[in-house]
Image (tube, helix red, strand yellow):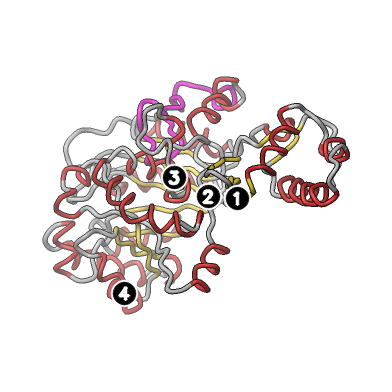
Amino acid sequence: MKEFNDKLIFSKYTKFLESENEVIIINGKSGVWGVLDKDKFELVRECISNEIEPENYIFKIESESIKSELNDIFEVLIDEEMIVNDNMEKENIQIDNVEFKLTGRCNLNCIHCAADCDINGKEILNTEDVKIILDKLINLDIKTLMLTGGEPLIRRDIIEILKHIRSKFKGTLRMITNGTLINDDTAFELRKYLTEISISLDGYNEESTDFVRGKGVYTKIVQAIKSLKRVGFEKNEIVLTMTATSQNSAHIDDFMLLCQKLEVEGGVRQFVAEGRGSTNFNKIGMVSYPDLSFKNEDELEELRGKLKCNIICKAGINKLTINEFGDMYPCLFLEKKEFKIGNILNEDLDVIFNSKEYKNFINQKIIKSIVDNEKNHKCKNCNVRYFCMNDCLGYNNIDYNNDIILKEKCTHMKPILNKILWDK
């Protein structure tokens, strides 16, 4: 067994689900999980609670078979970092990926837009503000910068912004755009600066795209892709995406075939019931959950062995979102008052990231799931609750606060998960 010189504790990423006779232990960061008999788990918990070294605790047990079994259990729990030294729990903050919303304005009015963007309003951040923010981000030694909006190409100073970035930043530079403002001249300029460009299509043909994004958009996007290819963008540098809705989800294969035809990469995004996505939920909304179907006991065992339980994301730890006001959030889908970290224009990032308040923010807001944070949450006593979630805290906060989504997900997932996890 590994030697430990400090106090042993259950990791803050370790989660527990209990039945009458068994306990499931989960490393929410790695997704690894396992099942213990409850009596064995109580021995482990007693050892940790009383701050006894496992070797000393096991030595005092009379039964040789239990000694051997408990030794194996501790070995696994330590190897999988479900039990750790207390000094291992310090969070390593290294912001590598940043999404920067350059604007809240957009020339389209898509019916599913989670950000609820439109053409109205004015730019909050002027060119110099944007440059100040970019300089602070680049000084963090980030690896990837994603420019988004709204529609980033709606800014008249976008080329000046891109020039400024590339004068100081050598990492991966991506842009998410609706593609409608791209012509040959724009494409020529973008080729100078971008590593990758992602275009939101949200359909598999002209009719389905225009239903979501507006009449004529499909044709403009196809032309934009041709312009990008003419100036040298390769297949793997153009990503065409579709948000899966009730209107198009049965046509994902058709969408991927379209991407092949256009010689671009394809990606399918999860629907988010925010903004106009919430307003129009009855028209296009859908609930996403993993396919956990099985036909027989052999398939069940295979599925059980492959199933992971990742419920901790990197938001606020390895990535950030900056919105069009310069406010900082852990990610795009946590752009809510309770998750605001600060304002990058007005505050020193080193001070924020090294502060006690920030560490508490990560522990209390980020690495706890919504079903643990909410005292009266409907899922708080469910013994499969961690397995129906995904590793995006933003998605979880949206889904688990929506009664329609929560009810449908629970109806579909709970009986399947009870069979997989507890054989019930």
Task: Give the mark toward the camera: 3 or 1.
Answer: 3
Q: Residue at x 43, y 31 (%)?
A: 328
What is the residue that sits farthest to the left in this orientation? 215
Q: Quadrant of the C terminus?
A: bottom left
From the image, tell me which residue sits under label 4: 253
For marks 2 and 1, give the CA distance: 6 Å
Q: Nearer the viewer, residue 183 or 92?
A: 92
Q: Residue at x 40, y 64 (%)?
A: 291
Tell me the kind of residue under disc 3. Arg
Tell me the kind of residue under disc 4. Asp
Residue 179 rendering spot, x and y as whole percentages: 27, 58
Q: Which disc, if any, is residue 310? A: 2
Highlighted magenta segment, given as a residue range:
328-351
For marks 2 and 3, give the CA distance: 12 Å
Q: Earlier in the sequence, mark 2 or mark 3?
A: 2
Q: Say few, some or many: other residues with alpha carbon within 10 Å of mark 4 (under 14 / 14 to 19 / 20 or more).
A: few
**Picture layout, residue 187 above or below residue 373:** below
Q: Quadrant of residue 177?
A: bottom left
Asked whether disc 3 touches disc 1, contact meaning CB atoms under 8 Å apart, the reply is no
Asked whether disc 2 touches disc 1, contact meaning CB atoms under 8 Å apart, the reply is yes
Residue 15 rendering spot, x and y as whole percentages: 56, 40
Is label 4 in a helix, a strand or a loop?
helix
Q: Earlier in the sequence, mark 2 or mark 1?
A: 1
Q: Which disc, if any, is residue 30? A: 1
Task: Give the mark toward the camera: 2 or 3.
Answer: 3
324 with respect to 307 (left or right): left
Q: Is residue 84 magenta?
A: no
Is label 1 in a helix, a strand or a loop?
loop
From the image, tell me which residue sits under label 3: 385
